[in-house]
Image (tube, coloured by chain):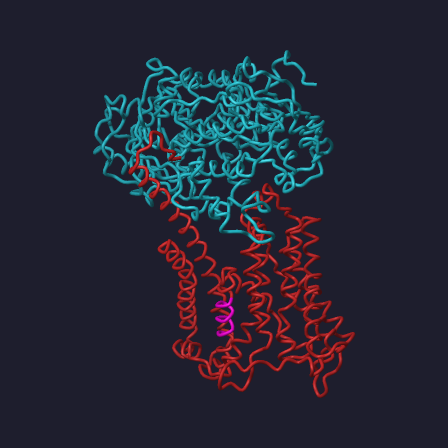
Amino acid sequence: MSTFSARKLLLAVAAPVLALVVAFIVTSGILLVLGDPVVEVWQTLLSWPKPRQLVQIVNGATVYYISAVAVAVGFRMNLFNIGVDGQYRIAVFAGAAFAGQAWFPGPLNVLLTIVVAMVAGGLWASIAAYLKVRRGISEVISTIMLNAIATGVVQWLLLKIAVKQPGSNTISTKPIPESSQLSGLSLIPGATNKVYTLILLAVLVGVLYWFVINKTRFGFDLRATGRSESAAVASGVKVPRMVVTTMIASGALAGLVGMPLLFGQDHSYGTTFQAGLGFAGIGIALLGRNHPLGIAAAALLWSFLDVQSNALQIRAGVASEVVFIIQGVILFAVVIAYELIRRADVRLEQQRVARELAATRSDAPTPEGATA
Amino acid sequence: MGRHGPCGAVASSRAVSVPSTAGRSDRCRVGLVTSGPGALTTAARSPNSGPGRGVVAITASAPERPATPAGADHAVELEGITKRFPGVVANKDIGFTVRKGTVHAIVGENGAGKSTLMKILYGVQRPDEGTIRIDGREVHLHSPADAIDEGIGMVFQHFQLADNFTVLENVVLGAEKLHGIGEGARAEIRRISDDYGLDIDPDALVEDLGVGARQRIEILKVLYRGAKIIILDEPTAVLVPQEVDELFDNLRELKSEGLTVLFISHKLDEVLSVADTITVIRRGTTVKTVEPSSVNARQLAELMVGAELPTPGTEESTVTDRVVLRTEGIVLGAAGASRNVLDGISLTIHAGEVLGIAGVEGNGQAELVEVIMGMREPTSGLVFLGDTDISEWRTREIREAGVAYIPEDRQRHALLLEAPLWENRILGHQTEEPNVRGLIINAAGAKADTERIVKEYDVRTPSINVKAGSLSGGNQQKLIVGREMSHRPKVLVAAHPTRGVDVGAQASIWDIIRQARREGLAVLLISADLEELIGLSDTIQVILRGRLTGTFDPDTVTAEDLGAAMTGAAGGAEETR
C-alpha cells in the first residue's frame, strides 16, 4: 500500500512540474527570439518577494482560490461553468449595492452581504442550468453568452444607482460603512499591508468543498455523474437535478469571489473593480486538478507570477504581459501532461493487476483460470 | 502502386530467413522469427493509401513475392504473434496457416483473445512480436487501410451502416474513387451480388432491410474494396438459425470463387458445419488446429475450455404462486416512428421464477428493461412490485425497494471504470447500508463489504483499491453480480449477464442465479444466448417488434423453434394474451 500511494503521489506531482519546466523553456525561447534579456526576466520573476509583496500574493491567491473552487465544482461532474466571471460580477455588484445601504450593523451586514452575493451568483447560474436541463443548450455556450450579458447588466444598473467619486471620473456603488469594512489580518511579519480577513472564507470554502465532494452521498453522485453519466443514471442519480444543483452551487461559490476584495480593499463596486477573475479560475482549477490543496498551490503560483511581473518593466525593461505567456504555456503543458500521465497511470495499473494475478495463478494453479 | 515497392522488397528479403512452414499440422508453433514488427514503420507508410486499392495492390506486388515453398496456396500465415495487452488476455505465440479458398474458423471462449488477434490481422493493433504473411509475403499492417490494401476485409459484429442511406450509398462511402458513386458503382454492386449470390439490390434503403441482408451488405462492402481474405467476427451472433443457414450458403459461394474466409465464433455446431479447418484458441494462444471431420462438438468444446464444459440447466421448479413483478400493457412510443418501440407488454414473474425473454437484439428488450428500472418513462402502462404500483417511481426508489439490476453494457451502465472497486461497490446503492451513514459515505463499511464480495464471488483482483477498468470482463461482472446480490433483492433484472465473460465466470454467475431462484428471487432474464435462456428459464417469452409474441416451455422448446418465433417466421406461436 505504501509503495502504491507513493507512486500515486509521484504521478500527481510529475505533471505540474513537467508543465513548469516546459513553460520555462518555451518562454525563454520566446524571449530569446525577441531579443529580450532572458536572465534578467527570470531573476526578476524568481526573486524572493518582499513582505509587502507576500501579502499581495496571498491576497491575490485568496480570490483566485474561491474562483477556481467554483469552477472545480462543475468540473467534477463534467459541467463546464465558463460563467464564473459573469456570476461573480453580478454577485459582487448585488452585494456591494446591498452592503452600501447599511441596513444592518457591522458584522451582520458582512454576513448578509455574503448571503446576498451567493444568492445573486446562484440565480445568475440557474439561467444556464435551466437552459441546459430544459432546452438542451450546452452550458459552455450559454455561460459565455451570459458573461457578456452580465457585463451589460451590471454596467446599466451601476449607472442607475452609482454615486460619483469626488475628484475622479470613476463611478461606483455607495461605499460600505466603515463598521462593515474588514481591515485585515497581520499574518506576515514586516509587512505594512494586511491579509484579507476573508481569507478565512476561502479556507472554509476549501474545507467544505473537500468534505462535500469526497465524503457525502451528494458528492459521490456528483463524481459518479462526472465519470460516467450513463452509469450514474442506471445507479439512480437524477442527472437533470444534479446539473441544476451543481450549477447553482458553482454560481453561489462564484458569488463569493469578489467578497474579499469588496470588504478588504475596494469597499464599493465600481468601474475599477478587478475583472477576469472567473477566467483565471478556470485555468487554476485545471492546474490544481480540482483538488482543494492542488488549487491552493496553483492559486499561489498564479498570484506569485502576477505580483512578480510588476517589476519586470523597471528591472528588466520587458513588458509585464510576458507573464501571460508563461501562464498560458503552463496551462497548455499541464493539460497535455495530465492526460499523458492519466493514460500512463491506467496502463501501469492494468499491467500491475495482470502481473499480480498471473503471479498468484502460478503459485496455486487453478484448473480454469479466469484470465479474460 | 509504387508505394508498395519498398514494403514488398524489404519483406521479401526478410521472408527468406523464415523457416519453411510446410508440413505443419496440429501445433502451428514455430520459433520466434527474428524480424520484429516496426522495422518498416516509415518505409511502408503512405499518407493517402486509402481503401479501395486492394485489387491493384495485390496484383501489382505479386511479382515481387518471394518463392517461399509453402506460401503458394497459403492466404494467411501467422507465426509467433504475441500481443501484450494490459488487463485482458494477450495473444501469446499464436500461429496457424489459412489455406486459400477455404473457410477457416477461429474458435475460443469469449475473452480467449480472438478479437485481439483479428484486430492485429486487420491492422487495428500491432503485434509486439511475430510475423504475418499474406500470400506468402511478410506484411506489416499499421492501419486498416494497410490491411485493405493487402486484400483483407473485415465484417464487424456490429454493422457499420447508415440506416437512412441506400445500399449503394453505404457501399461507396469511403471508396468513392473506385467506381464512382453512380452507374459504375451500381453495376459493380450488381456484379458482385450476382457473382456471389448475395441477392442485394443497390437501391434498397438500408433501414428497410433485415439483419441478414445488412450482413450481406457488409460482406459486399469488403468485396467491393477488393478483399480476397474476409474476416467475419462472430457473424452469427445477431442472426436467427434460419439466417445462419443462408449466411453459410453465401460463405460456401465465396469459397468456391477462390476467396478465403476467416470465421470467428464460439458456436461449435456452426463452426463444424461450415469450416474446412478449425483453429482453437484458449487463453490467448493457439491450442490446436483440427479438421472438422476429426472432432465432434464435445471434443472441440473441451479443447476450447480446457476442462469440463458447464451447462446452464435448472433443477426442479421453484416457481411459487406469489407474484413479485408484473407489468401491464406497457407502451413506449418512438419519436418520429410509426411503430411503437414497446407495444402492450404485459408480463408476470413469480417468486422463484426465471422469466426468459428471447428476441433478436433491437426488438425492445433494452427499452423494456429501462422502463422497469425507471430510467425511461413509458407512454402508457403500469409496473407493479408485489402489490405496489411503482410506475411513477424513479430508478433509485426502485432499486432501494429491492430490484437488483445487471445492465446489458456493464462498462457504460454498471461501473465507474476509473474509480476503485470499493467505490463501484457503492454505485447503485448510494443510499443503502453499509455504504452510507445518513448523508455521509461510509468508506470503511463499503471497503469491508467489498472485501467480502471479492472473496465470496471470487473476483480476481490484487486489491479493492484498483480501478474497475483494470479488471477483466468476467471479474467486473462478478463484482457487479456480487454487489447486486448483497442487498437482499426481490427481483433481479439481468440483461445478458454472461455476455463477454469467460467460461469460469459464466458458470459461477449461472450458479448464483440458480441459488437466488431457489431462495425465492424473481428473475427477468434477457439474453441473446438461447442455450442460456433455455437452460435457466422457467418460462420463455419471445419479443418481436416490441410485442410479446409467444410463450414457450424451456423443457420442450428447441433453439430452432425460438429462432422461428424471434423472426416472426412461425405462425403457430401461441398468443400470450
Instruction: State the residue at coordinates (53%, 56%).
Output: A214
Vertical relation: B10 (above or below) B77: below
Q: Residue B154's x, y, as percent?
A: 44, 30
Q: Quadrant of residue A182?
A: bottom right
Residue A270 in sight:
no
Q: Is residue B10 magenta?
A: no
Vertical relation: B288 (above or below) A48: above
Q: Which residues are magenta?
A: A296-305
Q: Colour of chain A?
A: red
Instruction: State the residue at coordinates (46%, 65%).
Output: A330
Number of numbered callouts drawn: 0
The C terminus of chain A: image quadrant: top left
Report whether A223 appears left or right of A36: right
Residue B301 in sight:
yes
Q: Residue B266's x, y, as percent?
A: 43, 24
Report whether B161 appears left or right of A369: right
Q: Quadrant of residue B323?
A: top right
Q: Colour of chain B?
A: cyan
Q: Residue B16's x, y, as percent?
A: 22, 32
Furthest-top residue in view? B572
